Amino acid sequence: MQVKTVLLIEGCVNLLIALCKLSVGFMTNSTAIIADGVHSFTDVTNNIVAWMAVTISETPADRGHPYGHQKFEQLAIFVLATLLVVVAFEISLSAFQRIGEPVEHSFLGLIILIAALIINTILTLWERHWAKRLNSDILVADATHTLSDVLTSIAVIVGWQLASRGYYWIDAVFAIIISSIIFYLAFKLFQSAIPILVDSSEVDAHKMTDAIMNIDAVKEVRRVRSRSSGKYRIADVVVTVDPNMSTADSHQVADSIEHLLATKFHIEDAVVHIEPFEK
């Protein structure tokens, strides 16, 4: 199984669920159900965006992108989070505009929504399994969207059933609860993508410096920086050694530092610059 295959299956299921939810929403005139259906449609859009991002991220490094295209996945996660914010805002606005409107009960609609809830729960667990197995951030983000469908569907069903019994305002309240959940999930996605996109430090610089200074030949650590590509950790280090050290020995020091960073800090791509020590 590949990441793009998982996304393709996810997209097809989300499309079917979205159509079912919208049909029930319009049939019962429920704001919350319509909102949930729109949310499921955005999941289809998310699947498409994620699929395109994965395709681009798998492209080998080229002249324009010498470090590769891995960050396109994080960019896609940022886009997905932004889309969630827009959807959450629209749901809240719609809830306020339609508050107090009557909601109809439908036994068939209830069966459809419960079936969609079960399918979404299975889909979430299945995608999280493959996200862990394939070590894919984009699948984790997409599974978060599917989880939001599970949570909102539960809120929708409860709110709809209460609203259909005459408590019309509850339907709008639950629509607002849905939007709040979506806002929170968007925040979590922003929280995971933005640090990588802006090259936030990935490893504590003091810990790296202390570890490097334990290498006998290193006189001074002048600079330590680390970041994440979205797939692996990257670091660049500047150290000083005895100015009389041979090139071969300096190269050995650099190899020792790279090995240390890989084994202790899980840094897969390290650039070590050696300079002569000056008192």
Image (cartoon, grey):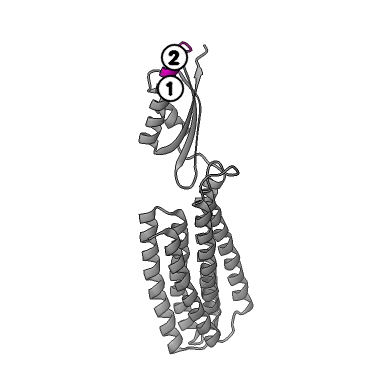
- Residue at (53% x, 77% y) in the render: 32
Residue 206 in magenta?
no
Q: Are marks 2 and 1 in contact (CB under 8 Å)?
A: no
Judging by the rendered image, the residue that carries numbered circle 1 is 251
Circle 2: is it few (<14), some (14-19), or many (20+) Cα within 10 Å? few
In the image, residue 187 lies at what x, y percent?
A: 53, 57
The residue located at (40%, 33%) in the rendering is 261
The residue lying toward the viewer, choosing from 258 and 212, is 258
Q: Label 2 amino acid?
A: Ser
Q: Amino acid at mark 1?
A: His
**Which label was assigned to residue 121?**
none
Camera-nearest residue between 147 and 99: 147
**Numbered range of the magenta stretch:** 242-250
Q: Is residue 183 above or below residue 195?
A: below
Residue 235 drawn above or below residue 212: below
Residue 246: image tag: 2
Tell me the SS state at disc 1.
Answer: helix
Q: Earlier in the sequence, mark 2 or mark 1?
A: 2
Q: Is residue 271 visible?
A: yes
Q: Nearer the viewer, residue 101 or 62?
A: 62
> Secondary structure under badge 2?
loop
Q: Is residue 244 magenta?
A: yes
Tag 1: Cα neighbours inside 10 Å, few (<14), some, or many (≥20)? some
Q: Residue 168 lies in what quarter of the image?
A: bottom right
Disc 2/disc 1 C-alpha distance (Å): 9 Å
* Residue occupying image coordinates x 60% and y 79%: 99
Q: How many marks?
A: 2
Q: Position of residue 255 (x, y in %)?
A: 40, 27
Question: Residue 172 placed where, x, y %?
Answer: 55, 77
The quadrant of the rendering that contains the N terminus is bottom left
Q: Is residue 170 visible?
A: no
